[in-house]
């Protein structure tokens, strides 16, 4: 009885082992590239697939977008500036069969192509373009890398330059340049303000000269403001009209006193 139970247990264990190596579940975001006796049989999944041990073999390939880190690369731009740059490549497999059959390791191959293309492209631009035109450079990188990985069934969807590390001396020089530019803009704005103020004052002077009464009203308004803000003694001048009256009388008297 004991021997029979042992035999039954061994048989059940063997059946479970065979089933575990025969039945497989492929997730929705995966495909199984299937081989039978070394011959390609296409892809299977998602869902439950059957694979017979020693006869069948399959390779799981993920279909989701992968973010591939491009390690820091040191390079020299066209204007002889040494920089350290890193980036990221986003890709996905659109043809699982090509990804398995056409290249030994599509992930490693994509990483190497991304790294080499980044170095090649960035060595052909100057520092200003590298700092100001990242989007255009990323688009160019994506196109070149995608062309290289297309035969492997890999589609590159986006390439971005993450960080650009400059030498300390270059950072200080750029900081001084930015500060000088800010000072220049501030001086230009101040000069424009002074010009506009001078033009406005010139127009006001012409208007007040043409209207003496307006000049008197402005004088009274200014004296009123001074009296409110400060406790001061104000010497009120004679109106201009009174001064002109005295001037006219003087001229009249001088004319009468002139010898005939």
Image (tube, rainbow, N blue to C red):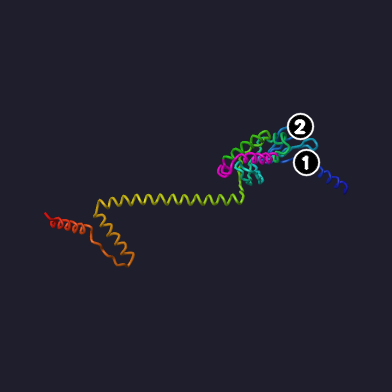
Q: CA distance from mark 2 to mark 1?
A: 19 Å
Looking at marks 2 and 1 on the same chain, the residue that comes earlier in the sequence is marked by 1
Q: Position of residue 79 (x, y in %)?
A: 60, 42
Q: Which residue lies under the disc numbered 2?
A: 39
Please indicate, yes or no, whether residue 35 appears anywhere in the rendered image. Answer: yes
Would residue 158 be found to the left or right of residue 188 on screen?
right
Q: Is residue 207 depicted above or below 112 in this figure? A: below
Q: Outermost residue toward the left?
A: 260
Task: Name the residue tied to disc 1.
Answer: 21
Local secondary structure at mark 1: helix
Mark 2 or 1, closer to the camera: 2
Can you tell which quarter of the image residue 23 is in? top right
Give the farthest residue toward the front: 259
> Residue at 82% of width from left, 43% of height from top?
14
- SS label for mark 2: strand
Give the main secondary structure of the magenta stretch. helix
Question: Which of 101 and 196 lies nearest the eye of the viewer?
Answer: 196
Q: Position of residue 142 (x, y in %)?
A: 61, 38
Is 240 in front, or is 136?
240
Q: Is residue 216 left or right of residue 134?
A: left
Residue located at (38% from left, 50% from top)? 195
Q: Is residue 128 magenta?
A: yes
Q: Quadrant of the C terminus?
A: bottom left
Number of on-image labels:
2
Dot 1 surroundings within 10 Å: few (below 14), some, or many (20 or more)? some
At which x and y percent is residue 254?
A: 16, 57
CB within 8 Å, label 2 to label 1: no
Which numbered circle lies on residue 47? none
Q: Which residues are magenta?
A: 109-135
Few, some or many C-alpha atoms within 10 Å of disc 2 (few <14, some 14-19, many ≥20)? few
Q: Nearer the viewer, residue 7 or 242?
A: 242
């Amino acid at each position: 009885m004991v021997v029979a139970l042992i035999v039954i247990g061994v048989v059940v264990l063997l059946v479970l082992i065979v089933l575990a190596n025969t039945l497989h579940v492929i997730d929705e975001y995966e495909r199984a590239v299937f081989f039978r006796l070394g011959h390609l049989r296409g892809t299977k999944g998602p869902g439950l697939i059957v694979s017979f041990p020693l006869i069948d073999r399959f390779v799981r390939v993920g279909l989701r977008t992968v973010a591939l880190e491009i390690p820091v690369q040191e390079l020299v731009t066209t204007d002889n500036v040494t920089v350290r740059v890193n980036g990221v490549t986003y890709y996905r497999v659109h043809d699982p069969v090509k990804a398995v059959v056409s290249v030994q390791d599509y992930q490693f191959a994509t990483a190497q192509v991304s790294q080499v293309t980044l170095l090649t492209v960035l060595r052909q631009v100057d520092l200003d373009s590298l700092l100001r035109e990242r989007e255009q450079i990323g688009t160019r990188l994506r196109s070149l890398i995608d062309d290289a990985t297309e035969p492997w069934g890999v589609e590159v969807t986006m390439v971005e330059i993450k960080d650009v590390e400059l030498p300390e001396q270059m950072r200080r020089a750029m900081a001084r340049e930015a500060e000088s530019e800010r000072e220049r803009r501030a001086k230009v704005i101040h000069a424009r303000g002074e010009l506009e103020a001078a033009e406005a004052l010139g127009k006001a002077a012409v208007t007040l000269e043409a209207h003496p009464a307006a000049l008197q009203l402005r004088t009274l308004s200014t004296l009123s403001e001074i009296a409110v803000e400060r406790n001061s003694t104000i010497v009120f001048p004679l109106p201009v009209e009174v001064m002109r009256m005295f001037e006219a009388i003087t001229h009249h008297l001088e004319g009468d006193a002139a010898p005939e």
